[in-house]
Every structure is written in structure tokens, then in C-alpha cells.
Amino acid sequence: MQRNEIEEGLLKLLGENGFELQNEDQKEDVLLDMDSLQFISLIADIEEFFGIVIPDEFLIQSEQVYLFNFVEMVEKAIEESGDEKQAALPEMSDENNNVSDS
């Protein structure tokens, strides 16, 4: 998975969680102001979206969280999974959110 695909997925998730990035040109340098509940909620969304498990070393929220921290986190989880197909970026349409029980 390419870094830009990871960034695209993270930007989608951040938007869904109420975070708006002001400067798209320097998006990796953006400081994300979030509390611990927002952090854990975003981690759960990231794991579900990318089909990965975030390594424990990334689950401690520091006082300053940048977008590049999340990009590195996803890259590391994909690397540790050893199977990029499992962590393939899902389609960005809403159709994937409709799961059938049949």
C-alpha cells in the first residue's frame, strides 16, 4: 500500500471524526488536537478501516499528535501484518458500509 493511499484513508477517517485540516499542502505536519476518547475512537476506526491491528507501542497518546504519527502507525501495522492484501485500502464509497447477513 502506498503512503498516499494511507494518507487518503486517514484523511477520510479524520473527517468522519470531526477533524478538518486547514492546510492540505502540509497535511503531515498538522497537529491534531484530541482528547484520549477521541484518540481511542480514531484508533478503533483505523483498525477497522485498514483491517489491521495497531501495535501497542502506538497506543500511548502523547501530548502532541500529528497526522504523520498516524501514517507511521498504519505503515508499521501493515508491515507487521506481513500481508498487504489483508490491509488493502477499501473502496471509498458508502456501498462498503452496507453489509448483508446472507
Image: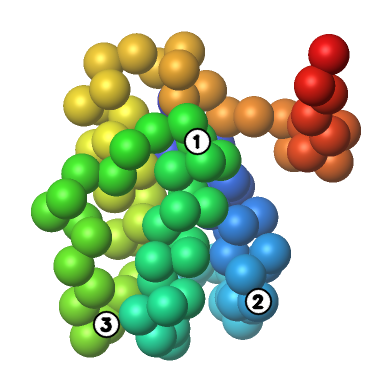
Residue 56 lies, in percent from the top left, at: 16, 50
Task: Name the residue carrying label 2.
Answer: 18
In front of the other: 45 or 67:
45
Residue 100 seen in the figure:
yes
Between discs 1 and 2, the one toward the N terminus: 2
What kind of element bears circle 1?
Answer: helix
- The numbered disc on residue 64 is 3
Left or right of residue 66, residue 2 in this image? right
What kind of element bears circle 2?
Answer: loop
On screen, residue 25 above or below 5 = below
In front of the other: 28 or 70:
70
Task: Name the residue carrying label 1.
Answer: 50
Residue 87 lies, in percent from the top left, at: 45, 25
- The numbered disc on residue 38 is none
In front of the other: 27 or 96:
96
Q: Which of marks 2 and 3 is in front?
A: 2
Identified by mark 3, the residue type is Gln
What kind of element bears circle 3?
Answer: loop
Q: Residue at x 43, y 83 (%)?
A: 34
Between discs 2 and 3, the one toward the N terminus: 2
Identified by mark 1, the residue type is Phe
- Mark 3 Cα shell of 10 Å, populated few (<14), some (14-19), many (≥20): few
Q: Residue at x 31, y 75 (%)?
A: 65
Q: How far apart are marks 1 and 2 (CA)?
A: 19 Å
Residue 61 lies, in percent from the top left, at: 24, 73
Q: Distance between the residues labelled 3 and 1?
A: 23 Å
Q: Quadrant of residue 40?
A: bottom left
On screen, residue 40 above or below 34 = above
Residue 29 seen in the figure:
no
Q: Residue at x 39, y 33 (%)?
A: 52
Q: In which quarter of the image is residue 54?
A: top left
